[in-house]
């Protein structure tokens, strides 16, 4: 196995502590405790995370139709289907444990690559605000991190290239943004195997080529088998293209993220910090300190970051700029930073030139870039302290400036100084970066719903609840206020209905099966934009479809006015709570009242 350091010297001090496996297990245990506290305490509750549980429950209820409904992320849904039946809290516990498994897997892989400080990759993962929030919330992005590291572990540590490649390939059925990373990993293994042939003979190089092709070819096993089985169900050779996991273009009139370049750059800086507070150390690393395989991993990190932050800016593909998409780069970043201290301490013990100046000048460039981002944050984000955007950027300008100054120290003390600075800064800053994940739901909204629910007596009246806010039911259940979850009905917005129509196969009855499962395994019984017989307007879209006193909980998310006639609903509502949120209507809670219809409405046919 390749390694950039053949020294047998045992690191001392804090650097030595970071070389102990006991520290790795301690970090893992702390991560589990923090994740369970956030998850079971409701602090990480998020509709996208709850959706992972619903997907697994839907597949358990309709195994055949669900397995070949790509939107459910079938591989992941299969993994969680047994535990999903035990309830959401059991799912959260299991999900945190799965995410935590990435920590020792990263350490074991780093050790196989020749790194001594195996706790550094573990720390990078454990201090990632995004990993912690997605682990506690149930997001599939955390599973992607564990899956990537499990695949690399099987290939490199266990020497099981077929099993490892199969695990990596299965991730294509979990998160599609993993594709560029898998392509780079496969190319890297092929290149390494070709270079590893000691003999110039044609036979030796062909043997090496076959060895390098194994992981890449194995990545095709699960997707190919899945697609072939799906042909039998859908009776369509091209079903995977006709019914993809997500739409490549949004529904008509759906709002798409856009904005000026400075704002996007600031948001990208914020997202990278939420991914890991240690990003600055990567900018100080000399590429020649990396072993060849780590260079390929680093290339995969760079490709993923550029694509995931750049493609939405130019309107390609149907996904937004949510920071959690960047988590595909977290395993690679952790392994690269694991080599960081190897680079800083490589020449410890000698006072001669060791390349400190190039490293330091790289730090100067990174510091200038951060300063630019901080300046843009003042101008474009107006120091949005409620989201925590600009203050962390400003703070990290100072932290990385300190790391830059420490990089000029003598080699004997530099590893310790940089390590202490990074560990202290990372551990202290990680909680502050939580808002930058975009996964922290405003407690004002959640608490407003729960408070009104109790004070108005809605918890005991048994009347239906109509909402477009996916967290209404999960939050009331978390607070122990919802005795009858079936009361809650979710009004599917126009883009959700459009997606279901496009992604479900009506000819084989898949739509009926999935909609039947959604009645019991969703944020609430769905209120469709159409009847199941195909008529344009479904039952429940008009306020007169509901009994007097029915509860209405609406959150304006910029799609609601294209889903229902808001003016009509307002005329039938006795509004009891109305919270503003910026320029939007925010939270609206009321009860349906049936005033006598004005003549215009009587003749409208509504």
Image: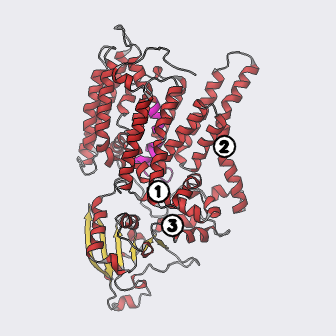
| Colour pattern | secondary structure
Image quarter where the N terminus lies is: top right
Cβ atoms at labels 3 and 1 below 8 Å apart = no
Q: Earlier in the sequence, mark 3 or mark 1?
A: 1
Judge whether 325 appears above or below 585 on screen: above
- Number of the front mark, 2 or 3: 3
Tell me the residue that label 1 is attached to. Answer: 90
Q: Which residues are magenta?
A: 309-335
Q: Quadrant of residue 451?
A: bottom left
Tell me the residue that label 2 is attached to. Answer: 220
Residue 280, horizontal then vertical, whole percent? 35, 31
Give the label on residue 521, or none: 3
Q: Residue sitting at 46 percent across and 20 percent down?
A: 289
Q: Quadrant of residue 396?
A: top left
Residue 83, horizontal then vertical, whole percent? 53, 57
Q: Of residues 153 and 583, which is closer to you in this image?
A: 153
Name the residue furthest right. Answer: 203
Callout 3: 10 Å neighbours few (<14), some, many (20+)?
Answer: many
Say which element carries label 1. Answer: helix
Q: Is residue 247 visible?
A: no
Callout 2: 10 Å neighbours few (<14), some, many (20+)?
Answer: some
Label 2 to label 3, Cα distance in Å? 31 Å
């Amino acid at each position: 196995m390749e390694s950039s350091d053949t020294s047998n010297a045992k690191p001392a001090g804090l650097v030595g502590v970071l070389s102990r496996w006991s520290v790795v297990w301690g970090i893992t245990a702390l991560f589990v405790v923090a994740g369970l506290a956030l998850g079971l305490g409701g602090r990480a509750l998020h509709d996208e995370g709850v959706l992972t549980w619903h997907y697994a429950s839907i597949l358990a209820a309709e195994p055949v139709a669900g397995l070949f409904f790509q939107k459910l992320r079938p591989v992941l849904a299969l993994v969680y289907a047994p535990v999903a039946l035990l309830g959401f809290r059991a799912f959260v516990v299991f999900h945190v444990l799965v995410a935590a498994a990435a920590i020792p897997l990263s350490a074991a892989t780093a050790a196989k690559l020749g790194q001594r400080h195996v706790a550094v990759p573990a720390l990078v993962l454990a201090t990632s605000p995004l990993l912690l929030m997605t682990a506690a919330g149930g997001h599939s992005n955390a599973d992607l991190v564990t899956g990537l590291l499990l695949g690399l572990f099987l290939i490199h540590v266990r020497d099981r290239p077929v099993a490892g490649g199969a695990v990596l390939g299965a991730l294509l059925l979990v998160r599609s943004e993993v594709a560029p990373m898998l392509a780079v990993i496969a190319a890297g293994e092929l290149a390494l195997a070709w270079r590893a042939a000691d003999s110039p003979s044609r036979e030796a190089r062909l043997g090496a080529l076959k060895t390098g092709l194994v992981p890449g070819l194995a990545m095709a096993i699960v997707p190919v088998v899945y697609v072939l089985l799906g042909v039998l169900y859908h009776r369509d050779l091209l079903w995977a293209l006709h019914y993809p996991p997500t739409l490549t273009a949004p529904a008509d009139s759906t709002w798409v993220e856009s904005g000026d370049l400075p704002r996007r750059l600031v948001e990208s800086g914020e997202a990278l910090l939420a991914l890991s507070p240690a990003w600055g150390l990567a900018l100080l690393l000399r590429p020649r300190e990396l072993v060849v395989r780590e260079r390929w991993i680093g290339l995969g990190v760079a490709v993923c970051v550029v694509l995931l932050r750049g493609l939405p800016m130019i309107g390609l593909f149907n996904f937004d700029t949510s920071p959690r998409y960047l988590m595909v780069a977290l395993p690679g970043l952790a392994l690269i930073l694991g080599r960081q201290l190897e680079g800083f301490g490589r020449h410890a013990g000698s006072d001669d030139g060791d390349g400190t100046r190039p490293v330091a000048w790289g730090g100067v460039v990174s510091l200038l870039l951060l300063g630019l981002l901080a300046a843009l944050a003042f101008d474009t984000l107006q120091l949005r302290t409620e989201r925590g955007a600009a203050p962390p950027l400003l703070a990290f300008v100072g932290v990385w400036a300190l790391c830059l100054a420490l990089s000029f120290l003598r080699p004997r003390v530099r590893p310790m100084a940089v390590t202490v600075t990074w560990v202290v800064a990372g551990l202290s800053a990680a909680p502050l970066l939580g808002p930058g994940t975009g996964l922290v739901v405003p407690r004002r909204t959640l608490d407003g719903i729960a408070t009104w629910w109790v004070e108005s007596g809605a918890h005991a009246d048994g009347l239906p609840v109509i909402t477009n806010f996916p967290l209404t039911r999960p939050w009331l259940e978390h607070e122990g206020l919802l005795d009858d979850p079936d009361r809650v009905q979710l009004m599917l917005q126009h883009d959700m209905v459009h997606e279901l129509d496009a992604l479900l196969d009506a000819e084989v009855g898949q739509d009926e099966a999935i909609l039947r499962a959604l009645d019991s395994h969703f944020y609430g019984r769905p209120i469709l934009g159409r009847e199941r017989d195909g008529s344009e307007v479904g039952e429940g879209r008009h306020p007169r479809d509901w009994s007097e006193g029915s509860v209405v909980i609406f959150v304006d998310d910029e799609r609601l006015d294209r889903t229902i006639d808001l003016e009509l609903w307002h005329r039938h509502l006795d509004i009891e709570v109305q919270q503003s949120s910026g320029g939007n209507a925010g939270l609206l809670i009321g009860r349906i009242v049936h005033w006598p219809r004005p003549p215009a409405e009587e003749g409208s046919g509504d």
